[in-house]
Image: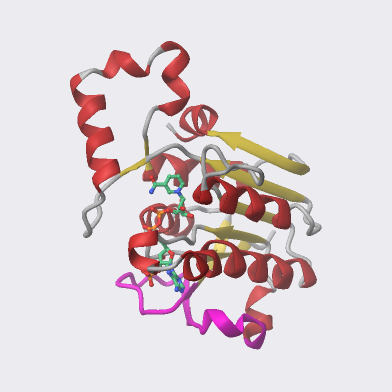
Amino acid sequence: MAGKIALIAGATGLIGNELLNYLLNANEYEKVVAIVRRPLSEKHPKLEEKLVDFDKLEDYIDVFSVDDVFVCLGTTIKKAKTKEAMWKIDVDYPVSIARLASSQGVRKFLLVSSMNADPDSPIFYSKMKGKLEEEIKQFTFETTAIFRPSLLLGNRDEFRLGERVSAAIFTVVPFLFAGPLKKYKAIEGKTVANAMYKVAQENKTGVMIYPSEQIAEIGR
Ligand SMILES: NC(=O)c1ccc[n+]([C@@H]2O[C@H](COP(=O)([O-])OP(=O)(O)OC[C@H]3O[C@@H](n4cnc5c(N)ncnc54)[C@H](OP(=O)(O)O)[C@@H]3O)[C@@H](O)[C@H]2O)c1
């Protein structure tokens, strides 16, 4: 049987880059298409890099004729500057990808959301992720897998205070995140990526939500 084709959005990011490597090294995939706005540093015989304008994704409809789609896009308010600009990257782009993927008969759609995603939250970030999940659930896929990691750990070029503080607390007092606080334990981007890859190989159908604790178990 021929291998599957994966499409990944966000392959230059912390989770996305780890995921790209899992997918490229996986026997299940014969080709991995990465839609990017800037060139990747990786070269690999299975990798097809597609530079796209994320505001005009419908111009690249053929790219979405794949088996599994992985979306790891996102930004920070510091980078985006405004809530509107952040919403466009964190919600509008993933929703456009889901729409095009669904129209092309994609079987599995895997999305990175966030812990505390809640469309009714008074907190902008949690509300944004909750609305994103609501919209994604409207599209038909054999499997829709939504991952809700807690604070991410991993090597970044940029400085993110929250991630550094969390990593420091966990190193000094690891027992703090046992018991009821376990769900708040920070998680490595690589663990999230591995969980996404593994879930894509399962035969579950319908919409599935993966909280951070479960991601940690699957991806370890
Ligand atoms: N940080 C945390 O602690 C945390 C916790 C829970 C959930 N999350 C969520 O997890 C997801 C992945 O996080 P991450 O830390 O792996 O992300 P990241 O390292 O910030 O990477 C984000 C990805 O999105 C792409 N992107 C950003 N702006 C774009 C734009 N205007 N057009 C096209 N692509 C754009 C980036 O591409 P470029 O390289 O071209 O910029 C990059 O590939 C995000 O949705 C985030 O909200 C994060």
Coloring basis for residues: secondary structure
Question: Which residue, as the protein is rendered here, is positioned at the far front?
Answer: 122
**Which residue is located at x 46 percent, y 60 percent?**
74
Residue 213 higher or lower than 37, as above or below: above
Say left or right for 80 vs 50. left
Question: Toward which corner of the image does residue 138 lie, by quadrant?
Answer: bottom right
Residue 30 is a magenta residue? no
Quarter of the picture containing the C terminus is top left
Q: Tell me which residue sits at (43%, 59%) in the image.
A: 20
Residue 192 is left or right of residue 105, and the answer is left
On the rendering, which quadrant does ligand 1 occupy?
bottom left
Residue pictured at 48% horizontal, 65% vertical: 86
Q: Position of residue 37 (x, y in %)?
A: 43, 79
The residue range painted magenta reads: 35-59
Quarter placement of the N terminus: bottom right
Residue drawn at 27 percent across, 18 percent down: 174
Residue closest to the eye, 16 or 194 = 16
Q: Position of residue 90 (x, y in %)?
A: 53, 61
Tell me: 69 left or right of 22: right
Query: Residue 36: image x %, image y %?
Result: 45, 75
Q: Viewer-proximal residue, 78 or 19?
A: 78
